[in-house]
Image (cartoon, helix red, strand yellow):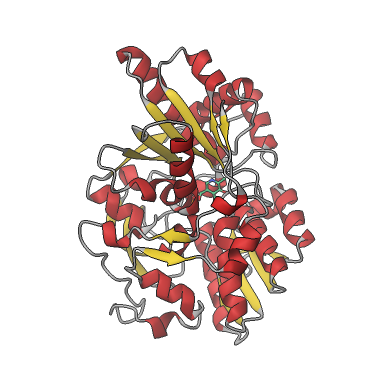
Amino acid sequence: MTRWTLSPDRIPSAWFNVAPHLSKPMDPPLHPGTREPVGPGDLAPLFPAALIEQEMSTEPWIDIPGEVLDILRLWRPTPLVRATRLEQALGTPARIYFKDESGSPAGSHKPNTAVPQAFYNAQEGIRRLATETGAGQWGTALAFACSQFDLDLQVYMVRASYEQKPYRRVAIQTWGGAVVPSPVDDPAHPGSLGAAISDAVRDCVAREDTHYALGSVLNHVLLHQTVIGLEAKEQLALAGERLPDVVIAPCGGGSNLGGIAFPFVSDADVRLLAVEPLSCPTLTQGRFEYDFGDTAGFTPLLPMYTLGHDFVPPSIHAGGLRYHGDSPLVSSLVRDGRMEAVAYPQGKVFEASVQFARTEGKIPAPECGHAIRATIDEALAAKETGEEKVILFNYCGHGFLDLSAYDDYLNGRLPDEQG
Ligand SMILES: *Cc1c(COP(=O)(O)O)cnc(C)c1O
């Protein structure tokens, strides 16, 4: 067998909180004005109380509400697949498994957190959400989730994507969301994720009926994504497989990585590997310090690896990995040596993505291609040593709305990367 599915009643009933497993407690977020630790009251204009509680929680497990499970069951549990055709093509003794998150309504892992975020906001009586989106994956995921709870949604979309990549904008509108290009006050600017966050936060604080929602970086977002790793662990056991030697995922803000990797954090022999673009090398070349989450400096200061909040990454195809900062939880694991990080230029990433498409058949999102690159390199290293390495990676999204990126790669139009 090469594909393991769990029956719908085996969907995890609680999220795994990594916070109590860290070697030291997290440093708190700081208020952008006073630089004092942020309390729940400071976050209340932005988030519902339940999410603020999750953000600060050190409980080991947090129950998933039944209303959330009912929607997650539209596509969960997701399959665990053994990539035997890729193994054969590489001639590796490694056993390669991937967790396929591409079958969700939005085609990525992001609905795993969009659904609970929409639920807790609706439960608190909020009528409208404001958010940002880069290439559009988060905007589409949240638009789907808002449609399930009758919430209005305003999306600020990075202008370059808004103009060049219409399909995710159309998907957001199909689910009932409203989209405008960002930055709203500078129509000549191509935009950035940090600037779009500023636009969304500004919208939110100006209206009583509106909250803000973030698709990555924050503790509660990574918490919601742990269904990925929890299911994968159970499926590996079902496959008669031992624990993986290495768990691999691409890292933009850290949510799909945290989602698959955190449930393995206490398994000391399991390596955890973050993969990022060489052109936005937050974990591999950034500094660990307090920084703003956005460009304008509206958000709390977070302790994280950062390239500086005014860093504007070059416009690579893996739009979801173009963020100056990183999840504080992921940052803290990297700083403490529990998690490793590696960076690749996008040409090497597309080479791996095409090899995957021609063996396993699936065309990955460019973000996902980063994990595939690292997986192939781990499998080739195992071939050198003859090691029967077990590799698990997160297939965090499909590439059907990114085919113009493949067109550029196949026709030699990817820019030579400086980094
Ligand atoms: C958004 C996105 C990412 C990057 O975000 P993380 O929070 O780091 O997971 C990676 N892959 C896909 C498919 C995405 O949509």
> Position of 378 compared to 88: left or right?
left
Instruction: Give the position of the C terminus as an image quadrant.
Output: top left
Q: Position of residue 72 (x, y in %)?
A: 61, 57
At x 34%, y 68%, the residue is 59
Is 329 placed above or below 184 here?
A: above
Q: Residue furthest right?
A: 174
Instruction: Give the position of the N terminus as an image quadrant.
Output: top right
The residue lying toward the viewer, choosing from 200 and 49, is 49
Res 61 seen here: yes
Location of residue 236 (image quadrant): top left
Location of residue 71 (image quadrant): bottom right
> Position of 58 compared to 241: left or right?
left
Res 190 seen here: no
Location of residue 354 (image quadrant): top right
Is 303 placed above or below 203 here?
A: above
Q: Position of residue 254 (x, y in %)?
A: 43, 51
Q: How many marks?
A: 0
> Position of 322 compared to 200: left or right?
left
Q: Position of residue 83 (x, y in %)?
A: 53, 25
> Position of 247 compared to 48: left or right?
left
Q: Position of residue 247 (x, y in %)?
A: 39, 38
Is 315 placed above or below 390 here?
A: below
The residue lying toward the viewer, choosing from 374 and 411, is 374
At x 62%, y 43%, the residue is 102
